[in-house]
């Protein structure tokens, strides 16, 4: 049995020395890997993470590096292409956005002014205010999203009075997993903060349905940092769920569930 686990968090670069990172530590992913590795049915674990997370203490785990979302997508795709993957545990905290460009407020202002001169301002002169305002909004949005970049692969000078970091959505890795491994048992993760149990369960179940997962582990940021108090809700396709308290118990439950489900799939 081959298992793919993603763990930790991704880091999206702003320039050569600055970045925006998720706070995933990889502790839970490492525990899950160790619990799965204890089973004689598991032959190999592909453990995809960035440079910082906790690594599993097992010789069955092959650690693969993926620092940003693009590298994660490539690594997961390659592992699934070259190996028969029986289960995927996608615990990595993946960035929802990545840097599109880094600019300044002045450059944005100049771009807007240049675009307005022969565009929306002409509509204002003719009295067509609605068209003018719609045009201004479009021009402003385009000017921000496609602002001239001051980053050229190196370190941005600290002499700049301000920086505007324009970000764009990253591809959803969880949405691609079923395509990468059609027969695999897939466990997704959903993290919210400060919501009710009902909202947490409903949101995680919606993620499960949307991405054809077999299970989703729902948790709240308010408990994640607590080794013993971390509360997880493992939800299945019928919206039944098991409450687990503590990272060790969460890892044990996910490992048991994956192994049982995978064996049934094989039979």
Image (cartoon, rainbow, N blue to C red):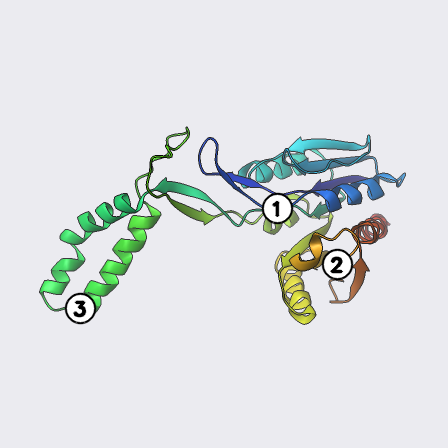
Can residue 26 be seen from the camera position used here?
yes
Q: Mark 2 to mark 3: distance in Å?
A: 53 Å
The N terminus - image quarter: top right
Q: Count the numbered circles shown.
A: 3
* Disc marking residue 254: none
Specify few, some or many for label 2: CA neighbours under 10 Å numbering under 14, 14-19, or 20 or more: many
* Disc marking residue 23: 1
Specify few, some or many for label 1: CA neighbours under 10 Å numbering under 14, 14-19, or 20 or more: some
* Disc 1 and disc 2 in contact, CB within 8 angstroms: no
Point out residue 257 in the picture as x, y percentages from the top left corner.
82, 53
Q: Secondary structure at mark 1?
A: loop
Q: Determine whether, in the image, residue 152 is placed left or right of residue 119.
A: right
Q: Determine whether, in the image, residue 224 is placed left or right of residue 259.
A: left
Q: Mark 1 to mark 3: distance in Å?
A: 46 Å
Point out residue 228 in the picture as x, y percentages from the top left corner.
80, 54
Q: Determine whether, in the image, residue 136 is placed left or right of residue 145.
A: left
| Badge nearest the viewer, 1 or 2 | 1
* Disc marking residue 129: 3
User: Residue at (28%, 57%) from the top-left corner?
Assistant: 138
* Disc 1 and disc 3 in contact, CB within 8 angstroms: no
Q: Secondary structure at mark 3?
A: helix
Report which quarter residue 219 is drawn in: bottom right
Q: Determine whether, in the image, residue 249 is placed left or right of residue 8.
A: right
User: Residue at (12%, 59%) from the top-left corner?
Assistant: 122
Q: Secondary structure at mark 2?
A: strand
Q: Earlier in the sequence, mark 2 or mark 3?
A: 3
Q: Which residue is mark 2?
A: 232
Can residue 118 be seen from the camera position used here?
no
């Amino acid at each position: 049995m081959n298992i793919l686990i993603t763990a930790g968090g991704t880091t999206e670069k702003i320039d050569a020395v600055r970045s925006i990172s998720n706070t995933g530590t990889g502790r839970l992913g490492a525990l899950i890997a160790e619990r799965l590795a204890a089973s004689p049915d598991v032959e190999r674990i592909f453990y995809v993470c960035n440079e910082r997370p906790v690594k599993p203490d097992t010789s069955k785990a092959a650690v693969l590096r993926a620092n940003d979302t693009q590298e994660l997508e490539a690594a997961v795709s390659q592992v699934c292409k070259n190996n028969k993957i029986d289960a995927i545990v996608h615990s990595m905290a993946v960035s929802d956005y990545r840097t599109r460009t880094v600019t300044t407020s002045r450059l944005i202002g100049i771009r807007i002014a240049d675009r307005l001169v022969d565009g929306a301002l002409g509509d204002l002169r003719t009295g067509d205010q609605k068209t003018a305002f719609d045009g201004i909004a479009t021009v402003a949005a385009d000017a921000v999203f496609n602002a001239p970049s001051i980053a050229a692969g190196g370190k941005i000078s600290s002499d700049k009075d301000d920086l505007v970091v324009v970000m764009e959505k990253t591809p959803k890795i969880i949405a691609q997993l079923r395509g990468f491994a059609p027969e695999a048992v897939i466990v997704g993760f959903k993290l919210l903060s400060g919501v009710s149990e009902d909202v947490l369960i409903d949101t995680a179940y919606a993620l499960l349905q949307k991405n054809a997962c077999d299970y989703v582990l729902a948790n709240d940021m308010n408990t994640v940092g607590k080794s013993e108090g971390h509360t997880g809700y493992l939800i299945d396709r019928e919206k039944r769920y098991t409450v687990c308290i503590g990272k060790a118990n969460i890892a044990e439950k996910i490992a048991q569930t994956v192994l049982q489900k995978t064996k049934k799939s094989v039979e």
